[in-house]
Amino acid sequence: MYDVTLIPGDGVGPEIAEATRRCVESTGVKINWDVQECGIEVIEKVGKVPESVLTSIRKNKVALKAPITTPIGKGFRSVNVFLRQELGLYACVRPCKSYKGVRSYFSNTPVDLVVVRENTEDLYAGVEFQAGLPATKELIEVINRLATGKKIGTGLDTTGVSIKPMSYEGTRNIANYAFQYAVENGRKSVTSVCKANIMKFTDGLWYDESRAVAKAYNAKFEQPELAKDADPVLAGKVADGSHLHYMERLIDNMCMQLVQKPELYDVILLPNLYGDILSDLCAGLVGGLGVAPGANIGPDSAIFEATHGSAPKYKGQNKVNPVALILSAKLMLEHLGEKSAAERLEKAVAAVIEEGKDVTYDMKANRNDPTAVGTQQMADAICRKVQSL
């Protein structure tokens, strides 16, 4: 019996959470679900994420979370970002895999990518200064006094500032995770992505450290001249990754590469902001956010969640596609060591999608197809398939 925190979220969250719970239980794995309410209504009432939510996750060490609405341009910051930073969930893992029957411009291309995104640093660290405040004016004056290169040239009272912190230790942690994941899952390559030609002291640091980690794993460098000293913290302490190819791409070029030839890439390692953007692009390659699962991993706990949002306009309609959260639960089962159950769940999802009968409207060739089923009915079909495998 595993103790798992279940956060139903808001919008369509409770519906897909219930569908996913039933699919997990159909595998035979015994779960004691610790349900914790943390939707937008609860947060607005309490004024923050309830402490009981954090206590539950810290105790159980594993959580399955449905989407939670984040106000745009106002209100509280993203609950997702808060939980990742509060719990030290430094690695965001988002597999993007083609399933037969999912409509996509890349249906004939074998896409099987894993985006590994740093979760706690970069612009998403949330260190911001609002335009017009005295502290912001003071900060700009200090920056312009200390800057040896380009300075902030816009008005002291009309400029907002975001700080982009990136550290060697943060980059080491996420790069180590990406290479370890690649070794453990039989992957062929790790591609490190940033914009070091422009941001030389932050993204440049990212490349310096990801190269050092690649060297520690004894990976094969696409550009041998980039191979320098191995990271001293990891050297001699990590698995042999000599079968892995290490590549580098600038973020803008990576976007083009993925649209042109996604089959050439495998594990993609990115800082926080680029990783958020590119994971949606990769989801688009395989049919959209409806089939895009996600995991957030830290040293002590992990949260598994769909990549998509809460879609409040569909709340209570039993209409939305539950696959992304179900595939996130598949990642959760793997994390728990229930690999056989995880494999059966994924096979069941793939089979139901390929049959194309018991699927939600968005997975039909015609979105107005009257044979489309609801969220719970698709979950029913997946449960039946799991039990037949």
Image (cartoon, rainbow, N blue to C red):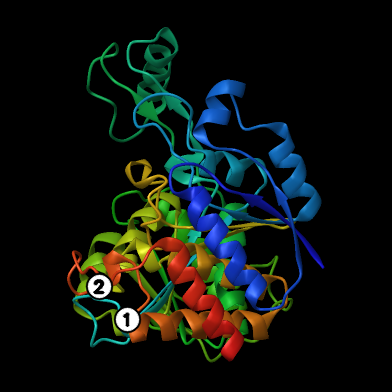
Using residue 138 as the reference point, say whether residue 356 is left or right of it. left
Q: Residues within 10 Å of mark 1 (few under 14, many from 20)?
A: some
- Residue at 57% x, 22% y: name it: 45
Where is the N terminus found, in terms of image quarters? bottom right
Distance (Cα) linking label 2 and label 1: 7 Å
Vertical placement of residue 74 versus 119, above or below: above
State the image quarter where residue 280 is shown: bottom left
Residue type at numbered disc 2: Lys
User: Which residue is tagged 1?
Assistant: 356
The one nearer the camera, 239 or 95, is 95
Q: Are marks 2 and 1 in contact (CB under 8 Å)?
A: yes
User: Which residue is tagged 2?
Assistant: 364
Residue 331 at least partly seen: no
Residue type at numbered disc 1: Gly
How many labels were placed on the picture?
A: 2
- Residue at 62% x, 83% y: name it: 184
- Residue at 62% x, 23% y: name it: 46
